Amino acid sequence: MSAVTNALKPIFIGGYMMLLMGATGYSGWMIHFDGNMQAWGGVLLTSAPILLTLSWLMAFRPTARTSARFPSLNALGAIGVALAAWAWISRDAGWLALLLATTSWGGFWLYAYWFSSFGGRRPSTKLVAGSRLPHFALHDVHGNVVTSEQLTDRPAILIFYRGNWCPLCMAQIRELAERYREIDALGVRVALISPQPHGNTVGLAGKFGVKFDFLTDAGNAAARMLGIAHPNGLPMGMQMLGYDSETVLPTVVITGRDGRIVWTHETDNYRVRPEPDTYLEVLRGHGLHAA
């Protein structure tokens, strides 16, 4: 990913959300006062469903994954642009409705195909199946140093997540917590690793109350060493909550009893992540369970 792309993405998402809110509110107002349902209803189709979906994901954190491209939202956007375009062609409406519709739908394409992607992410050369997990150090909720060797003294699932601010990360952790008994019965450690402020990690551990290892990667040092750091990966404005602009690319690593890597998942879309059943299949497939 280029430095320019990394720098533009945090700005884009804030601007896009403002555009969606403005287009949705204005088109609703115009439907009420202007009465042109075709033109302004078209604008609503390109903005409101996307706005509601993204707001729902951020506010309620209901799922750890979505479809890669939101085909239903894309279809609604196309219909909305077609309606606004026909209203303009038939002179039933001016150019503003068509402009807002095409801009909202164009923003959706940028969100789905550019913003959500990590730009053709290349697998880390430090996370290769069959090799030992490299040495790095983290801090547990008590502030103690924990090394990668200590984390892999038994089969382990290591999840590098972006932080408490990320709704899909929180949903990913919640669904793992819901499978805690199943994972614990296999004798497998679960380590959740983030470069976020340490107090946020401590708070998250208290929220879930399961025997996972909640760990802080101070200064994103481990992520950088592993080649999974994400410069400028934080949405604009989150810095005010104490987060650093650099975060980590969502990554899952499963290791065996000897600390060797048996499986990794390095997504190229922050909304596409493996399900807990996948981890359990990998563990059982490699015979990684309690003796």
Image (tube, rainbow, N blue to C red):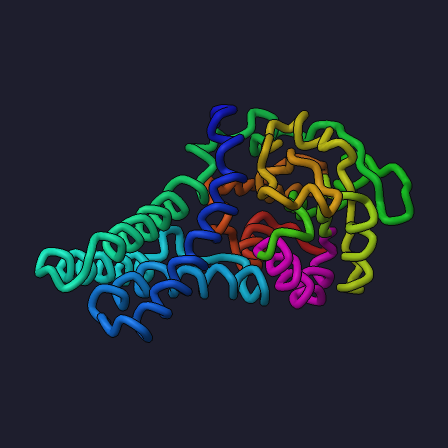
What residue sits 52% from the left and 66% below the top? 56
Residue 92 position, x and y percent, is 14, 64
- Dominant secondary structure of the magenta stretch? helix
Q: Is residue 203 magenta?
A: no
Give the side of residue 57 with respect to residue 195, left or right: left
Q: Residue furthest front?
A: 33
Up-down relation of residue 157 to residue 97 (above or below): above
Up-down relation of residue 236 to residue 134 (above or below): below
Using the image as rendered, state which of residue 186 and residue 147 is in the foreground: 147
Up-down relation of residue 269 to residue 231 (above or below): below
Residue 157 position, x and y percent, is 66, 48
Residue 193 position, x and y percent, is 71, 44
Q: Is residue 155 visible?
A: no
Give the side of residue 150 with respect to residue 271, left or right: right
Q: Is residue 178 magenta?
A: yes
Give the side of residue 266 with respect to residue 69, left or right: right
Residue 276 position, x and y percent, is 57, 59
Region rendered in magenta: 168-189
- Identify the image quadrant of residue 119: top left
What residue sits 27% from the left and 68% below the top? 41
Using the image as rendered, state which of residue 175 and residue 167 is in the foreground: 167
What residue sits 90% from the left and 43% below the top? 143
> Where, quadrant-wise, is the C terminus in this rendering?
bottom right
- Identify the image quadrant of residue 124: top right
Q: Residue furthest left?
A: 90
Up-down relation of residue 279 to residue 217 (above or below): below
